[in-house]
Image (tube, rainbow, N blue to C red):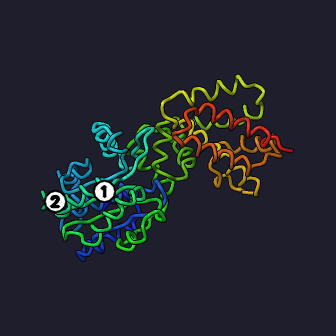
């Protein structure tokens, strides 16, 4: 029996239902797996199972408890996520981020241009809240998303709560980077591993939140995202297919570097915005493009095995046009530029992309 079919991951649901029926849900769960496979939505579903289910494990989706948890308004359920330092965080900005997450639990919480983390003050507040009586729920549930972003002092403070949890408290940690968590934290949690979702399930989830999505575009975007739900929604928001076309055009301009005016006309709009999302996305598509070239060069026979499946013919024409391109060197240069773009000390993304084109030129034409 599943507690919410829409969440997917039936094996993990069955494990939890068995534990719930035996009244043996562990005090601390650690949901881990690749980014964008629905772990945070699943954690919210666990909170609803613990507080809005009848004696048979059927969740009342019309109840006020269910709605309050979904909207992050239930006093006994806390959703913690990385935020900017208090000096850089405006209360209305934090509230807006939480409201967006409530509208779509599969989306990424972002704060443009700001470093985020989970600090000691947040965990201290949680520990204080853990000591209070239940307000209206059956269990207190604290969900810590992106738990790898705990600062060292915050992780140590959380460890004390894991060692001596109140009886009515369930802690759910969520991470896509298990290796970054303290071994002592991992050892005190029961771990549930999550696998990437398939194309059909991702498409079904997307249609719930974007009912008028173009089916052909959606299929292409899901593959380009690497079957990552968070990235799929970002790509739908950011005209990803247009940015993918810009990435291909960027390569053409890098080959014809002497036509510098055309290159500048291409990259200036990408770097004019306050955020760097479009530029970052274009670089991501460059990496995918050359990953696909590597696969084709290794003799992949089924186009379904490449990310840019809708551009398979263009890929092969590009390979024919640049037969001596040094792919490994190109990938290294693009990865280096992504790291530079993510460094807030680099104040001129236009310069970064221009320099990248200059560095790619000899690699694309290498004899």
In percent of width and height, residue 70 lies at 27, 50
Residue 56 vs residue 364, the one in the foreground: 364
Q: How many marks?
A: 2
**Other-residue count near label 2 (Cα within 10 Å), few / some / many at <14 / 14–19 / ≥20:** some
Left/right placement of residue 92 relative to residue 212 reads left
Left/right placement of residue 153 relative to residue 280 reads left
Q: Find numbered disc 2 in the image and state the secondary structure of the residue it sits on.
A: loop
Location of the C terminus by quadrant is top right
Q: Residue at x 58, y 35 (%)?
A: 243
In this view, 197 is above or below 313? below
In the picture of the structure, the residue carrying the numbered disc 2 is: 137
Left/right placement of residue 90 relative to residue 51 reads right
Q: Residue at x 32, y 70 (%)?
A: 16
Pointer 1 or 2: first along the chain: 1
Left/right placement of residue 236 relative to residue 186 reads right
In percent of width and height, residue 63 lies at 18, 53
In this view, 6 is above or below 320? below
Checking the image for residue 44, the label placed there is 1
Q: Residue 364: which quarter of the image?
A: top right
In percent of width and height, residue 21 lies at 24, 74
């Amino acid at each position: 029996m599943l507690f919410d079919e829409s969440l997917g991951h039936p094996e993990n649901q069955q494990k939890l239902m068995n534990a719930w029926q035996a009244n043996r849900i562990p005090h601390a769960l650690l949901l881990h797996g690749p980014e964008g496979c629905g772990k945070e939505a699943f954690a919210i579903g666990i909170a609803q199972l613990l507080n809005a289910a009848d004696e048979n494990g059927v969740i009342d989706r019309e109840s006020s408890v269910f709605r309050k948890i979904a909207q992050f308004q239930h006093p006994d359920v806390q959703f913690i996520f990385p935020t900017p330092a208090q000096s850089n965080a405006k209360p209305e900005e934090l509230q807006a981020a939480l409201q967006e997450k409530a509208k779509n639990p599969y989306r990424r919480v972002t704060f443009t241009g700001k470093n985020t983390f989970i600090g000691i003050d947040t965990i201290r507040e949680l520990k204080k809240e853990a000591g209070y009586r239940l307000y209206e729920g059956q269990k207190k549930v604290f969900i810590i998303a992106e738990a790898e972003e705990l600062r060292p002092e915050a992780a140590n403070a959380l460890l004390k709560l894991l060692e001596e949890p109140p009886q009515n408290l369930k802690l759910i940690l969520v991470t896509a980077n298990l290796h970054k968590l303290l071994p002592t934290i991992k050892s005190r949690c029961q771990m549930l591993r999550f696998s990437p979702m398939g194309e059909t399930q991702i498409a079904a989830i997307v249609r719930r939140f974007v009912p008028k999505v173009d089916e052909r575009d959606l299929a292409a975007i899901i593959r380009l995202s690497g079957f990552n739900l968070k990235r799929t929604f970002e790509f739908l928001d950011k005209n990803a297919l247009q940015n993918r076309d810009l990435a291909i055009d960027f390569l053409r301009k890098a080959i014809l570097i002497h036509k510098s005016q055309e290159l500048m006309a291409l990259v200036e709009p990408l770097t004019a915005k306050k955020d760097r999302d479009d530029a970052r996305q274009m670089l991501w598509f460059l990496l995918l493009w050359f990953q696909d070239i590597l696969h084709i060069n290794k003799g992949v026979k089924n186009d379904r095995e490449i990310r840019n499946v809708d551009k398979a013919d263009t890929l092969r024409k590009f390979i024919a046009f640049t037969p001596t391109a040094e792919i490994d060197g190109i990938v290294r240069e693009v990865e280096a530029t992504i790291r530079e773009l993510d460094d807030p000390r680099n104040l001129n993304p236009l310069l970064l992309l221009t320099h990248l084109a200059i560095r790619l030129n000899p690699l694309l034409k290498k004899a």
